[in-house]
Structures are given as structure tokens and as C-alpha cells.
Amino acid sequence: MNHFGRLFQISIYGESHGNSVGVILDGVKPGIPLSSADFTADLLRRKSGGKGTTPRIETDEIIIESGVFNGYTTGAPILLRFLNQNTKSKDYSNLVSHPRPSHADYTAKLKYNGFNDYRGGGHFSARLTLGLVSAGVVAKKMLKNVKFSTKLINLGGCEDPKEFNTILDAAIKANDSVGGIVSLKASNVEAGLGEPYFDSLESTISHLLFSVGGVKGVEFGIGFKGANLTGSSYNDLIIDKDGHTSTNNNGGINGGISNGNDIEIKVFVKPTPSIAISQNTFNFNDNKVEPLVITGRHDSAIILRAMVVLESCLAIALCDAMLIKNAYKGD
Amino acid sequence: MNHFGRLFQISIYGESHGNSVGVILDGVKPGIPLSSADFTADLLRRKSGGKGTTPRIETDEIIIESGVFNGYTTGAPILLRFLNQNTKSKDYSNLVSHPRPSHADYTAKLKYNGFNDYRGGGHFSARLTLGLVSAGVVAKKMLKNVKFSTKLINLGGCEDPKEFNTILDAAIKANDSVGGIVSLKASNVEAGLGEPYFDSLESTISHLLFSVGGVKGVEFGIGFKGANLTGSSYNDLIIDKDGHTSTNNNGGINGGISNGNDIEIKVFVKPTPSIAISQNTFNFNDNKVEPLVITGRHDSAIILRAMVVLESCLAIALCDAMLIKNAYKGD
Amino acid sequence: MNHFGRLFQISIYGESHGNSVGVILDGVKPGIPLSSADFTADLLRRKSGGKGTTPRIETDEIIIESGVFNGYTTGAPILLRFLNQNTKSKDYSNLVSHPRPSHADYTAKLKYNGFNDYRGGGHFSARLTLGLVSAGVVAKKMLKNVKFSTKLINLGGCEDPKEFNTILDAAIKANDSVGGIVSLKASNVEAGLGEPYFDSLESTISHLLFSVGGVKGVEFGIGFKGANLTGSSYNDLIIDKDGHTSTNNNGGINGGISNGNDIEIKVFVKPTPSIAISQNTFNFNDNKVEPLVITGRHDSAIILRAMVVLESCLAIALCDAMLIKNAYKGD
Amino acid sequence: MNHFGRLFQISIYGESHGNSVGVILDGVKPGIPLSSADFTADLLRRKSGGKGTTPRIETDEIIIESGVFNGYTTGAPILLRFLNQNTKSKDYSNLVSHPRPSHADYTAKLKYNGFNDYRGGGHFSARLTLGLVSAGVVAKKMLKNVKFSTKLINLGGCEDPKEFNTILDAAIKANDSVGGIVSLKASNVEAGLGEPYFDSLESTISHLLFSVGGVKGVEFGIGFKGANLTGSSYNDLIIDKDGHTSTNNNGGINGGISNGNDIEIKVFVKPTPSIAISQNTFNFNDNKVEPLVITGRHDSAIILRAMVVLESCLAIALCDAMLIKNAYKGD
């Protein structure tokens, strides 16, 4: 369902071509200064218009519909909305019978018996991530001292940032798309966040990350490469009374609980499925495989815009875990 | 918290050296034949005693404490218990001041203000996975036709199964440990399982997988290697009216929803942190780094026993998603 | 928190004098015809303007912001909004220091450290029930054959409907207010809805009813008067193979589960706390008891408008229970 | 489902004639001294054997199966079990075809397709309340200064405690049963507990109270009698800077949030449905109404044993609300 969180709760709604998309945040601490300007920076990081992103430009002006009064959060639910304005009236109905491969077109139709709003991906559109980014902004405010550092470390298989521009140009020229890997880091995270079974910090963070369209892999610390290590080389030795470790192969989490070191995560985002190259895939009307050419406006590398979304997911999960920890503080 | 699931719910409890460990299952359909014999096969797959596993042997006899009557599930909660019998009375308290690196010793102490049961890992012991395996057995019964295929595809960095024995021998001889990668596959999974935000099938499956101690990476389909592909090579083309695809890079899930192809997942399990090699790590009593030698009984490759646990997590998540889908069937 | 439901989920938001109030509905079955006209009748029952209700008139036009496409529900979350238009710009801040007795003014201030939006009751305003009524409309559509019958059976202590008008006139003339008792009945409710511990049908229904401002008592069937009966006179004897009973003292629920007879409930709604009569109550600015005269627009008998709200709560709880039951149907 | 609570979570299990009944408590603060002796007093209040209670005597010895170490709670889940020992091997199967009126026999059979354990009421037995009482004991420890005062204020329609013995004797002699009304009071409850929509303190308290078998009415403060009052007489005037009120018609809760005055509740418990008097009710085997004579051991006034159970429900709800409030304390 479209709801997440034990204390810091988010409920997401909207479709690509409906009135608006957005999110209700509940469990926000009262007394936090909050205005639309607070969202500008992160929303800009998600914005389209740059190379490799869709030419559909939206103003993405946030409307704070409730839960803020005199410039401060009230403790009541905060509804944040974004109007859909630059929607093209083209006919998307061909995608119902001739679904885009690797996309939600086919599964959404099955799940919702054909009643889903298919225009621009409908409820499955990347536009829904506006709500996540907004929720992340508020979560970061509640987390106070936590610092986030998010980097693109792999684009289209290449790990050299200097080559990323070339990779992107090639994909655009080929009417193709690329994916890659994002590195997330959160510093100054208090130790003791997370629960054993079943809300380990890895569990709640990955739950949110995997809700973002296109995410197909999540690893903590050294991740899968750790298969090459033995226990004696993998183990992070504690070096001081604050629990700092010599290495951070575990990504700052042991037994599902933060250990005070940086939370380090890598996330694989698949290549954007919507590409302009013709693809031979099944047409359910004609009952045979036929070439599909997708004509809409799309991102060649959605990963560029996904970075801040993934960072927001991390912030949301940490904020919820922090509130749960707070509940048990004091006498 | 120690509870998971929307309709198929599990609540886990227990410590390594307490009376017992186990699980309450709620939301089980009434009328399913169930006896202790049904659990034997999967419990055996998790059992210790083989090469690379701890010499702590437990009978692991399941006690069906409630929820089954005349050989059938009743629809009421099923409490499944496993007595802890072969517990050694050795003193574990040194691990409180001199915590094992990469283990929950340190974080559990912080989180629970030193009141956690530290004997044998306490609530963080791998013994808790008995409850998960048991829950998985019941979930599989509810899933009926779904077939699971679980394989060890990487041990200690090696991907050749013929070499796994050698890898294991070397680790044992070196008093060290190894991790690796498990491949999970579920076939005959009905299309339409999973929700968009925030309970994508990837989200709920990974939530459970990451609750298992030692899991540090989860990827679907081709996973991180997909960063090397462009959209045109990554996309899974649909080849027939049943939605079968030519490749399965997405691991059977699009837009968070199963597409009827096999669910394919890879899970990285880190090397067992408890090793007999001396490790230089902080002693909080002496306030300095000192050699730590762990003398208990441990697994050299906990991954061997984790395979069925991970498979169970997958079954539990699929079962919950199936029930949710059922709720919307019919007129 | 402002969220309820296991499968049919509602998330409420808004304040009396903010932009809007409303609700997100999740877990709605796709394919249900839905337009703003469907809400008209129930919204009208909640509307103000009649005798005994506030002169604040709002158009209460519903805005279906998402989740409906081509006239049918899509299965995605439905955001329903109502603009706040007829808000008076008067100064409410005196109520912060001189809170209205029996109202949320004082507790909201404490809970939210003074950051709550106090204008017109803020998030605690009866205006929030627009979301409940709207959710109830959708729930009733999903329940199909269930019929609701809602009656005012006690106004200001009087049980004779012919006298209600006189009671109301007297309260208005006295600048005072009255409460009363509402009788709810749902017919054609399928047997087998509800769970033993802890989601008995009484539990979930009362949970929702008591979330409505002013509700201070809920009883099922004969209710508190049943204290006068012995078991032999209280027990509802079954009279036919469909489980019909000779009496309905249990209100259609046994062991927390619907038995196929009518669900019958009585709900006590307290007199509207906001009255124009001067009241001697503590002024926190002056640190002493002082007369408080409330000058805003208020209902003399909010119960008149609450009836459809309570009926909606019943519908929501039944709808959620029905979906849960559906999940276990079939093989 | 058999699970409740946002932070202080309880999961109940068991049947009257199974191995055991009990509860898992999760979200218990670590470091609370806890031993079986702590449960003695409240378990004794629930115990049978006195006049008007069933002659089935159980030792009700509590088994602390997990979550307590060296005499203190660890923060891990606490499984509390009670063995079923004094179970009679009589045949209960006639109740399946000839269900007891006003009892769960009929609804349980429908809900669980006849697979429910019907012996002694199975999962619907009052024996399950052992888990609630135990959870209440732990909740009270976490609530520290809160004092509970629970009284029987109506037995069989009589409000004079001096006559209760006579009422009881008459019921026993007549092979009949009686119900009544319990008054619950919690003092020293911190102001600010509870949430607006949908977890008002009334909502969560009533949710738990109505999960107890036989509870058919819940009212706060003056309750239904408040219908006789006007707003000016109902309203609780604030008399000092601590928020104390001159009256407590609202039962200590405004806007769903505790106001610092006593929480006051009245609960109607219906007459025990199982009576030895012959009752003419439908026999589904013979397809006609026939006399039913119930021969088991039963309570003539289950309300006597229910008092501590209801008090426990109140404690559990307050404890959960307190933890949620704690989460938002501090900077």
C-alpha cells in the first residue's frame, strides 16, 4: 500500500497526468521552521531539463497545504502537493495493448484489471518521487546533525566520473538509455538506531529504496564484493571508545542497528526502460511480437535525477528509526 | 520491532540461551493440513553439524503450541517453539566489554543500555532463524504451486561449486570464515503481486532478507551487473500473451509488481564475524585496543545454513502479497 | 496518528482555516464508477445551515485529485480535497491563553507545544469529518448490498423525535448546546467479518467512532441496559439455518465477528462545547479563572451533522473487515 | 488480527484446551526489573474459584520464556506462557452443530470454515485474557506513577455493592448468569497522550476493551447520561494552571488527548452466555430449534474476573500512547 513508517509516516498519491502528485507526512515534530524555500535545493537536484533528462519541464512549485502555521510545523499532517502542468495530451492508449518492456505498463494493467491510469505511467511515474524528496527534506530537518553525501559512482558501467559525459552523449545519440550505481553516505548518525527482527536499519532503508522505480540492487558497506573477503579481513575492528572502526565494510550497521560510523550504501538503478529505439515486444491486440517505438519525452539516464530521491529515502528511514529510539530515552 | 506482515503476520521471539526461540504466525488460512513432519525437511537444511557449521547440535524439534487442531490449521495464531537445550554455561560476559567486531555485541549493548542478554548473541543469535524457516514452511503451503530453487553461487569469492569444499577447508584450517552469494528463484508466481509505493515486491522481500543477520546485499534479476547494459539490452522483451520475457534482467518484477516470470534474487551473506583468529579490537574495560580471541562454537560459513532461511523470507513475502491480492478478487 | 485501516486505508489531513481538508483513500478496488456526484447526498447530510448548525456555510465541493480515471477508480490512492473558503479572519489567539472548556484547545496546545494551528479548532475542527464522510461513500460502494439506517434517538435527553425541534429551539435561545444519541444500523452484513484479538468488529468500529470529536460513548445491541438482564434473557437465540436470532441484544456481533444479523450500535455525542454563554474557566495569561465568552459561529447541536459521519465510520470499518475476509476466500 | 500496538506491541495466542495460552510483548523498555512474582497480584484478581466463577481451577503459573535476563527486561520480545492443565476431556463437538447462543461458537465456525478448535471456546476462551493481564502488569511498570482504581458499580442491574452477593446467589441458584458495569479510573496520567485522527485515546482504549469477550459498551466520563446535559452543564471548567477541572464529564480526554485529569471509563460486560438453563436454539444437524443444555464448567458472572482484564487494557493503551509522546520529547 502507499503508506510507510511507524512514527514518521508518509502516504503518497498522484498520477503523472492527473491534477497533482504529492504526499502526506504525519508524525512530524511540531515547532520546526518550514517554508517552501526549504524544499528548493533538493527539488532542483531532482529537476529535469539537463542533459540526459526528459524535456518535460515542470515548475515543481511545492504547495504546503496543511500542517504548517506561522512558518512552523504544527504536529498535524502536512500535505505537500505539486501540480501537473506540462502534460501532453497525446494518446497513450497504445501502450496498454503494446506495453513497454521492463516497465510497469503490463503489470499495472494486470493488477488493476485495466482500470489504471496509463497516461505517462500514471501512478508509476517518476513524478511521484516529488513526494519522496519533499518528505526527505522534512526528515533531514528532524535529523538535524546528520550529513548526507550522495555520489554517482557508476554510469553505464563506467566508474570514472570524467567519462560520464561521454557515456551520456553516446546513449542520447543512440536513442538508448543507461543506468548506474549511486553511493549514499550519512554521517553523524547516532548509534542505536534500528531494530533486530524485522525492522533492521537495512530492512527499512532497503524497503524505501526498492520502492523507487528502477532500483534493482541495494548493498551496505563493501556489499557483494565482500564475498571475496574472509571474516578476518571483512570484520571492522573497533579502534576507540566511541566505536569508530578501522574499516566500514558493514556500512555502519551491525545486527540491524547503527554503530555510529557512517551509513554507507550503494544502489543500482537500472537503465531507463523507455527508449526511442524500436523494440520487438508483444502486442496484445495483434497477439504477436511487433516493433514498439516509444515517442514520448523521456530520461536517457533517470539515475541522474534519482540520486536525491534515494538520499531522501535514506533520510526518511533514519528519521523514523530516530523517533522510535527517542521513545525509549529518559527514565 | 519484531513483527512483520500485513495479512500473513509473524512475531519472532527468543534468545540463544533462553528457554526457547520461536514465532507466532497469524493470518494463516484455516484448513491447511499441518504437522511437525511438514517442517522436517526445511529445518534439516538449516541444521548445524556438517562441515563449516557450528558443533552446537540442537534437536530442533518443533513444538506446535497453538493454532492447529485435528491436524489442520484453525485460523488462530500458531505459536511454534524450539527449546534451547545444548547451551554451554561458559562465561560470555567478556564480550560485553570486549565486543566482537562486525557483530551485534556492541550495538545491542548501546541500544539496550547494557540489559541485553549477551549469551550466545542473545536475541541476535542465528538461532532465531528457526522461526523464519518455520514460517516459511507454512507460507509455502499457502502458496501451493510456487516452486523454490535456492543455490549457493559464490563461496568466499569463488563461483565454481566444485571448489567450494576446498574453500571451506581452507577457512576452517585458518580459523577464519567465509561468506558468499545465494541465488533464490521462485517459479509459478502469479502475476500481479506487490504494490507500488511503498510495498513493492522488492521492498517487502528485501525487508525480510535484510532482517537476517549477515545479509548485506540484495539484488533482483541481473542486479548490479546491469549497470553495464544499456536500456535496449537490459529491457526484457515480452514474447507471448502470458507475458513471458526473452530475458529476466528485472527478476520477474516490474513497477514493484510480479510479472509472471520467475522471481530471481541474489543475496550477499557476509563472512561469519565470530572467528577463532585473534583480532585487535577495542576493549571498553581497559580502554584500549587489545587482542580478542573468541572461543565459542561457531560456523565457518553461516551462509550454508542461511540458504533455507533466505528462501523462507521470500516465501513469507510472497504469501503476504498473495493474500493482499486475493482481497481484491471477485466481484 | 492520522491513518487507519489494514487494507482499506484512510489518511486524513487539514485544518479549519488552512487551504483545504481531505483524505487519501488507499486500497480501493479498481473499476468502481466514481464521480463527484456520488458524494453529494452524504455531504449534504453533513452540511451546515439548518437550524442548530453553524452559519458558516461552505460549498463543500469535492475535488477528486487522484485515483479516478475515465470515471472509474484505478486502484491507486484517491486524494479527496475540500477547499476552505468561508473562513473568518477574526483573531482566535485569545483561545490559546483562555481555552474553551471541554474542547481540544488546551490539550492541543500541550501536545504540540503551542505550535498547533488554533484557528477555528485547527486540525481538531469538525471540518475534518468531510474526509470521513467521503471515505464512507467509497466504502459503501465497495460494500454493495449493505444498507445503512441512521437515526437520532435522543436529543438533549429527550427520546421523542416530535419534541426534538422544541429542544433545539430552547438550546439556541439559551445560547447553549445539546448532545444526544445516534442509532446506527447496517443490514445485509455478511457473517464472518471481524477478528478475535484484537480486531474484533466492535474494536475497529469503536476505534473509528471514538476518533470523531464529541463521541464519548459507544454500545452494541442493547448496550448498557443489558446489565439489567440475566444470561437467559440477554442471549440471542438462533431461530433458523441462516443464523437469524430472535432478539439482537449482541448487535449482530459474537466473539468479535459478525453473525449475519443487523449490526446495531448506539453512539453518544456530547453537547457542542463551544457555546455563547459566558463560562468561568481558567485564563492562563492572567493566571486565574475568568469569564469566557465565545463569539465564533458554532453548532448548537453538532450531533445533527455528526450522524452521517458516524455512519461513514461504520461503513469504513465494515469495508476493511470485508476485504480481510476476502483475502481468505477461494481455495 | 491478533496483534496490537504501535510501540508497545502485543501478540496473543492460544486456545482453551491447547498446550498453553499467552502473549508476546514487544517494545518493552530495557532495564525494568521483572519476575514472575510481579504478576501474582493481578493474576490472582483474574483467578477463578470464588463464588460466581468457574470451578475450573488452573494454577496460572506464568512462564517467562524470553526477554528477561538477570531479573531485568532486555528490550527483546517477552513471551509469557500459561500452561493449560485442568482441561476436561469431555466431548464439545455437539456445540459445533448446536451452537451456544450469544457465543462465538457459530461465528467462529463460519469464519474458519469449521476448522476452529471448538473445545472450551478455543481461541475465544476467556483464558486468553491471561495474556492481557500479563501485558497489563508490564505496561503498569512502564507507566510508573499512574494509579489504577477499578470497581464493580453494577451487577445484574443493581448498583448497590451490598446487594451484589444476593444478586450472585440468585443467578447461581437459577442456573443463570449476570453481567454488569465496571468503572475504570487511571490517575496521574500525563497530559498530552493520544492522537487526533485516528488514534484518539478513546479510540485505542476502546479498541482494546472491545477485544475482550463480553464487552458491549464503553463510555468515557459521564458517558451516555451526558445526553441529559446542555453544553453549559456538561463542559468541564478549568480551575487552575495545571488544567484541573471542576467536573470530569469528559473522562480526562479532550480532542482525543489526555488533559491531566483522571481517565474515567465505564464498561458494560454482558451476562456470561454459557448458562446451565435449557435454551431453545437452532440445531444445525437436525435443522430445527431444539433445547440446548450446556453442561460444562462456567462463570455465573464473568465480570468479576474481567475487572482486572479491563484495567490491563487501559494500562496497555496508555503505555503505548506514552511511548509515542516520548518520541517527540527533547530538542
Image (cartoon, coloured by chain):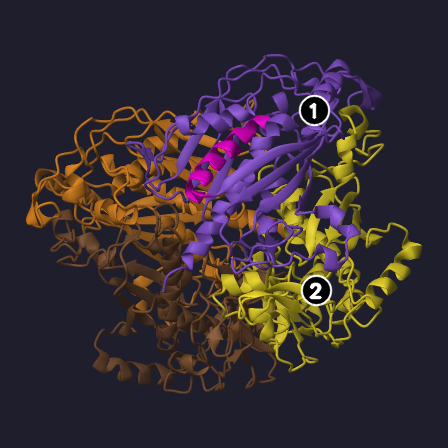
Chain colours: A orange, B brown, C purple, D yellow
What residue appears at the point 74 percent right and 47 percent down from the top-left corner?
A: C224
Query: Left or right: D72 with respect to A93?
Result: right
> Does the magenta segment cover residue C127?
yes
The answer to which image quadrant residue D141 occupies is: bottom right
Q: What element carries label 2?
A: helix
- Prevailing secondary structure class for the magenta stretch in the rendered image: helix
Q: Residue D158: where, in percent of width, then height? A: 86, 51
* Residue type beneath disc 2: Ser
Residue in front for this viewpoint, D301 or A262: D301
Is residue D47 highlighted in magenta? no
Residue B207: x %, y % from top left: 41, 58
What is the spatial separation of the Cα atoms under label 1 and label 2, in whole angstroms?
A: 51 Å
| Residue span colored magenta | C126-145
Q: How crowded is mark 1: few (under 14 residues within 10 Å), some or many (20 or more)?
A: few
Q: Mark 1 belongs to which amino acid? A: Lys
Q: Which mark is residue D134?
A: 2
Residue D207 higher or lower than A120, as above or below: below
Q: Nearer the viewer, residue B313 or C42?
A: C42
Residue occupying the far right of the picture: D162
Is residue A175 shown left or right of residue C89? left
In this rendering, position of residue C142 left or right of residue D87: left
Label 1: chain letter: C
Could you tell me how many numbered marks the image carries? 2
User: For the point 33% across and 60% down, which residue is it?
Assistant: B218
Tell me: B254 left or right of C121. Answer: left
Q: Residue B59 in the image: x percent, y percent?
A: 49, 86
Q: Name the residue under label 1.
A: C162
Point 32% across, 42% down: residue: A307
Q: Which chain is mark 2 on?
A: D
Determine which quarter of the picture holds residue D229.
top right
- Residue D164's disc is none
Q: Where is residue A44 in the image (x, y as percent from the top left)?
A: 33, 30
